[in-house]
Image (spheres, grey):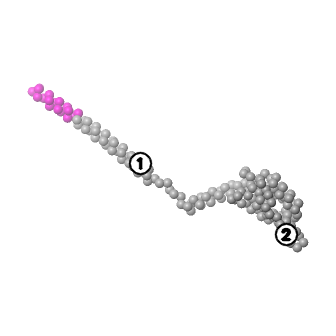
Amino acid sequence: MRGHLRPWLAALGLVAVAGWMAMQALAEHDAASKTEQAYIRLQTANKSKTVPKVDRAKGEKLKRWDELRKERAFAWTPIFQAVERSASEGIELLEFRPEKTTGYLALRGEARDQAALVDFLNNIALQAPFEHSHLTYQALRSRGQLQTIEFEIRASLRAM
């Protein structure tokens, strides 16, 4: 009887080993399947993430706010002080116009005479906030017996 039992025990052992190996293979297959599904989910998530487009109107609005912030942060006090230090009694300043696109400052006004205008231009040229100051316009203006010189001076603003 012992002789007949050995092949059955060997066959039973082989079936047990085969069952164990099948269970290991099934567990490996499940792990691989889960990893593949996670990979597909990540790929799909990356494809669906599109960079939100800023519409043109919003972009223009942000640009305008940035310009206003820079304009507000600009130090005007040294420029006003420099113009005040340069002026004399012979100068009547009528317009103070900064030109944002070119970085120039236009000063328009009237001078009592040519000497007052030349002194004002020289004083502006010596002030720290300005560079490349020049006279762009002058004309004699008469109002009754009073004669003045209309002028425009342009000066580029030095980076501060």
Residue 144 lies in what quarter of the image? bottom right
Residue placed at 33% from the left, 42% from the top? 32
Residue 79 lies in what quarter of the image? bottom right
Residue 69 lies in what quarter of the image? bottom right
Residue placed at 49% from the left, 54% from the top? 51
Residue 13 in the image: x percent, y percent?
A: 20, 31
Q: Mark 2 falls on what kind of element?
A: strand
Q: Earlier in the sequence, mark 1 or mark 2?
A: 1
**CB under 8 Å between discs 1 and 2:** no
Q: Mark 1 falls on what kind of element?
A: helix
Residue projecting furthest to the right? 145
Amino acid under disc 2: Arg
Query: Is 16 in the magenta?
Result: yes
Query: Is 126 in the magenta?
Result: no
Residue 88 in the image: x percent, y percent?
A: 86, 59
Q: Nearer the viewer, residue 82 or 156?
A: 156
Amino acid under disc 1: Leu
Residue 141 shows which numbered tag? 2
Residue placed at 25% from the left, 38% from the top? 22
Q: Which residues are magenta?
A: 1-17
Residue projecting furthest to the bottom? 144
**In this figure, which residue is indicated by the disc labeled 1?**
42
